Image (cartoon, rainbow, N blue to C red):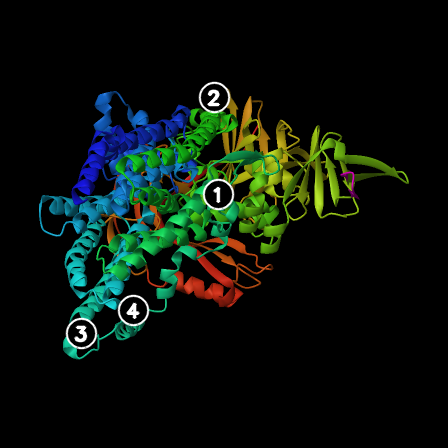
Amino acid sequence: MVKTEIKEKRKKKKAENTSSFGKYYPMFKSYGLPLIALLLAYLGFKLRNITSNYKTFLDPDTFYHYEIYRLAIREWLPKYFPLANPPAGLKIGESLGLYTVQAAFYKLVSPLGYDVMGAFKLWPPFVGAMTIIAVYFLGKKLHSSWAGIWGAAFMMFSYANFTKTMSGNNRGEGPFMMFFLYAVLFLLIYLDEKKWNWKKILGGALFLVTSVLYMGVWLGSQFGVGILLLFAAVHTVVLFIFGKIDELKRFTGEFYPLYGLSLLLGLALNTTGFVKIKGFLVFSIEAFIGLAILAAIMLYGQRAGLNYSDKKHRFGVVAIVGVLGFVAAYFYLGPDLLKFLGSASQSNPLYQTVAELAKTQWSDIKDYYSLRYTYDYTLKKIVGVDGLIFFVSLAGFVIVLVRFVLKLVRGDLTGYKEVFIVSYYFGSLYLLLTAVRFVFQASGAILLLAGIAIGEVFLFVENMKESTTTKALYAILLIILFLPLPIIGAQHSKALATNTAKAQGSVPADWVNTLTWLRDNSDPLDSATSWWDYGYWIESSLLGNRRSATDGGHAYDRRYIVADFFSHYGNESEQDFEAWELNYLIVWQKDIYKFNAISYLGGAIDYYEYSHVPMFQVIPMQYIQYVNESGKTVVYINTGQAAYQPVMTVDLVKGMIINGGGDIPYVLYVFGNYGVLAYKKVAFSNFVRLAFHIPYSFEPWDAQKLFANFKPVHNNGGVSTYEFRPFAVYRIDKYENGTWKAFYSTMGGGKLPLGEQKLRLWISAFGRDVKDAALIFEAYNGTELIKRETLAEGLSIDHLNETPVEVSLFVPNATSYRFVLIQDGPVGVLNGEPRVNGEVANPSYLLDEGQSGQLELKAAFRKDYSDVELALRASVVYYVAPNGKDIEKDEFHLEPHQDIITYVPVKGLSVKAGDNVITAQASMPDGVFEGYIQKLYQKYGEDKVVIVKKRVEPVFITKKEYAIWEG
């Protein structure tokens, strides 16, 4: 009987060995799955590379990243960018590792025929492909080969990951995830090796290298540092509570030194700018030291008489030490500790208006973690259908928790893998629920857990008490069952990428044409501004290649000021744009769809109106009805369900202004084939008039003044470009027969009369006063100056209460004439990194109050100047909140201000056209800002003033010519 059973087992084993499935299944897992992972990486690369045919870039921020990447190819660690934040320029605040790594990538692939642009566009799909491979190996290490391959499959097509690794999106989030996942992989290799050998040493070394890289490519890399710190804390506590002291000793002896060394390396590299998360690294080191002290108490506390006899006592030790540690940290770091820990959720009016910082909703999760997508005709966008991948990841999370508990019950000491997964998933979900912008960063954990969920099904089959052949057959059936997931997902992702690629870039043709005109028709030192979303386009060497006063990542304080100008009119809208040395203003009609944010930041509306009341609504002509009521024309907006009268109708086709009953708080503008309803508070704003070329004045002469200071110079489609003139004549009267008669206006035009004339010039001083100026008259025949006469000296005009200037002159017969104002004004811009005492300094805040130093500046000028004064200009941007600072209250609204506090003289000098290197000793007095801010508190109330930004900038002041009228 025994012999018979033995024979049967031998036959069965022989049959398995001779079965093709039984023989090749292990080989398929060992060699086939890695090859499939490479195939998935290749497919992921191809999908992400579809958008490489963009003429420019998919993402607006990438325009800026491209400029710094170009600098990094030459300098490796660039410190300064001259085209942002004029006139001082920008000390680059982003982690320079992002650009250095891409520059190194260019050096590697350039021998293959890739130019600077080609390598730049290749980088995101390459990152995506390498991340897919990382997920495969990490899933294999954390769970199984099947978890790795399915995680890689999800990563290949997932829209959540796809968005930040498509060609044309070169932000730091993608490289961060790639390097972080590899860092974790190398860490696990290091921890898995029980004895010191080449694998352990290599794993530890590669962990340190990839840790520095993930810290260096993204300012948000605190996330990775924090996840590993959380992992260390949780695993340490779990091991102690469950009495795994030997394993705790091993973990603290191996992980703690390696992780601590990675923090110190990151901190050391902060001095180079490669890594720029110094504050968080210091905090992490302090927290890590506290954790190490806690671990020491756990390991050696019994020697001091602590009771570790059971779980209850050990948990009590952890709780007491933890509370004491938090209290100590609170007193060490001060009351700002809680703010620091919650910094990711802090907000202000500016952040309230940024779409990607909005709180994540289920619809967002569904849009990014679905298998299938469809077009929503109501929302007018492609939306996710099922959110399936997210649900599968939740199943994977439950599986990991169950596995972890079972391991603890069995006394299995490899639970650190499950602890990491739980820490990573919790941290990712926290980010995901904090803001929409973190949807991508959460994809690493979510897709990994989704792969683990499916991998668990395969493990269940492999652990069945069946023959290898049978299990192999079951595995094949599972593959067939789950294969539609990546196939369907890839098809939808390809369709999304293809549709996106058809747009040929994020820059509309009207903007391309406008910025091409700007580049070809302005001085290289000129600056322009628009709403901040378009600043990177203005700065891009591919488009405008000009300085921009504000952009997508810098000069946030100026967003309030631009918003104030756009959303108001008259004196209330005036800001000293010349302090920015602004030359051109660009206005886009489509910003009506962003005008809730603009109006809110500019202080024209309150928070309730921002959240609930649309500033503009486009109305089809069939809804606009002109009705004669008792001989009076009345305009209705008739939707078929109800009819409403606006406050006023401005018919730009018929040239009519029709007052209405005000059933709705809007002004209706009629343009030929459509109408626009403008909310009454912004209906006559500068934006409306400049964007739509509307000469209507709510107050007398207001439109004439606006279009005098902002002279139309170019229009393309819905994008209009204006030349900014701080001082401009908007009206001229001549004295005739005892009365003044207007013969010239900005919109109406008019010729200068010949002969002896007594004139009255109405000068619009925008945002700054005329002070001690000279008024000059010039006459030209062609380009030859035939007359130049000083009409007035010591001239001053209050820009908030302008009065006309009377002059007498003889006007000769000539081909053209000019009135010129000469007064002190800023010239020149910084064109290289400024240094203070030999160190690269922040150009927007060169010296602190009470600080002195040797300045070394590189400044560029349009022409020679013989008498220039270098000064330090102290200014502050703040807003007043009359109804209190609580930004979540419906009645919250703000009033932005930009005040120049003082000019601190530094040095007199002469300069040449082009670049000049200037050195000078400078000192900033004590109390410049504090004294001024205290005055603001006294004027408005300390509980109503919010300081946005303080600046100390170098400026060059000289007698400057302003052409205030030409004709």
Q: Which residue is mark 3?
A: 301
Q: Nearer the viewer, mark 4 or mark 1?
A: 1
The residue range painted magenta reads 638-644
Q: Would you name the residue on which mark 4 appears?
A: 329
- When asked about the image quadrant of residue 443, the answer is top left
Judging depth in this view, the residue of 586 and 415 nearest the camera is 415
Secondary structure beneath dot 1 equals: loop
Report the side of 866 relative to 249 (left or right): right
Q: Please state which of the two labelled residues, at mark 3 or mark 4, is closer to the viewer.
A: 3
Nearer to the camera, 482 or 492? 482
Q: Is residue 698 above or below residue 157?
A: below
> Is residue 712 inside the magenta stretch?
no
Disc 4 versus disc 2: nearer the observer? 4
Q: What SS does tag 2 mark?
A: loop
Q: Quadrant of the C terminus?
A: top right
Cα gap from disc 4 to disc 2, whole angstroms? 73 Å
640 within the magenta span: yes
Amino acid found under the numbered disc labelled 2: Thr
